[in-house]
Image (cartoon, rainbow, N blue to C red):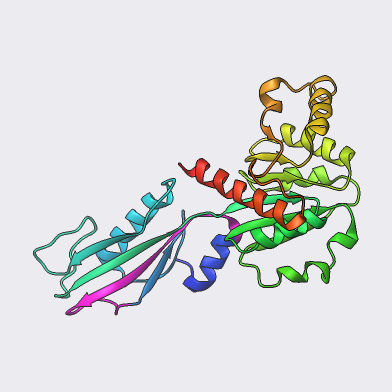
Amino acid sequence: MSDMTWVAAVARLRERREPGVLVTVATVRGHAPRRAGAKLLVGRAETWGSIGGGNIEAVAIDRARELNGVARPEPELMEFALNDKVTGPHGVQCCGGAVTVLLEPLPVVEAVAVFGVGHVGLELARVLARHHLDLHLIDSRPDMLTDERLGVLADAVAQIHVHHTPLLPEEVLGELPPGTHVLIMTHDHAEDAALCDAALRTAGLGSIGLIGSAAKWARFRRRLATEGGHDAAAINRIKTPIGIPGITGKEPATIALSVAADLLRTFESARS
């Protein structure tokens, strides 16, 4: 058990992109080791805080570790009778009371990387920043990533990671967390093409989306096949155009809303 508080540990797990389960003593009747509200955070290998030790804590940790391995865990309640007639897997607790414990999974959030923070990219960042996710913003132009310009994201719920890449933005792809969803919308078609090629060569990414017209994509497909050596199945991993087909507005905010909604739908499909 670490000496770090469970509050700080939640932030650490979030930063590490590791799942955890927050265990809370929800109700207490009679005598029990801890009062209602006591908390324990259970990670894959560590725990922080305590709900009183003994059989209650050991059983809760066992169940929390099981939940950490589930794809879509749901909160659940566990009830414990603390008397000498009840023997738990880890022994007997004879306090004389009864305890209900709430287990709340803290799953790893989605990660999204937006390559190109121009008019559409910034509007998209504004929408995505209102969600619990890791948001990576990448641009080769330093003036797109100034504190002043990104000030509109100051109230973000998301954790935002800014990458200024003056030469090779595709190098960022290898640094992204596993499962990151990639959206390619830079100011330069050559940069977009290089990113498409690099994304297909980067293992472990989530979905890959490219903004642009059918004519642009036809050129890219040919280059990815002839120069990049990618087969049709690999090339078809790239979705273009991105966004919801029925939304045809050209304003940056409209495009961003469409792309964000389509991405949220992708998240749901991946979880099902």
Residue at the image point whose x is 32% and y is 65% from the top = 102
Where does residue 18 sit, x and y in percent of width and height?
Answer: 53, 54
Asked whether 18 falls inside the magenta stretch, the response is yes
Taking depth in this image into account, of 152 and 21 the one nearest to the observer is: 152
Spot occupied by residue 133 in the image (x, y as percentages of width and height)? 60, 57
The residues colored magenta run 15-36
Q: Is residue 3 visible?
A: no
Residue drawn 54% across the image and 71% down it: 8
Q: Is residue 178 left or right of residue 125?
A: left
Q: Is residue 54 magenta?
A: no
Q: Nearer the viewer, residue 157 or 266?
A: 266
Query: Could you tell whether 245 is left or right of 79 in the image?
Result: right
Residue 182 % position (x, y):
69, 44
Q: Quadrant of the C terminus?
A: top left
From the viewer's perspective, tell me whether residue 139 is left or right of residue 270.
right
Q: Position of residue 151 (x, y in %)?
A: 77, 71
For the image, the number of numbered tags is: 0
| Quarter location, residue 64 | bottom left
Q: Residue 204 appears in which quarter of the rendering?
A: top right
Q: Is residue 12 visible?
A: yes
Q: Residue placed at 79% from the left, 46% from the top?
A: 185
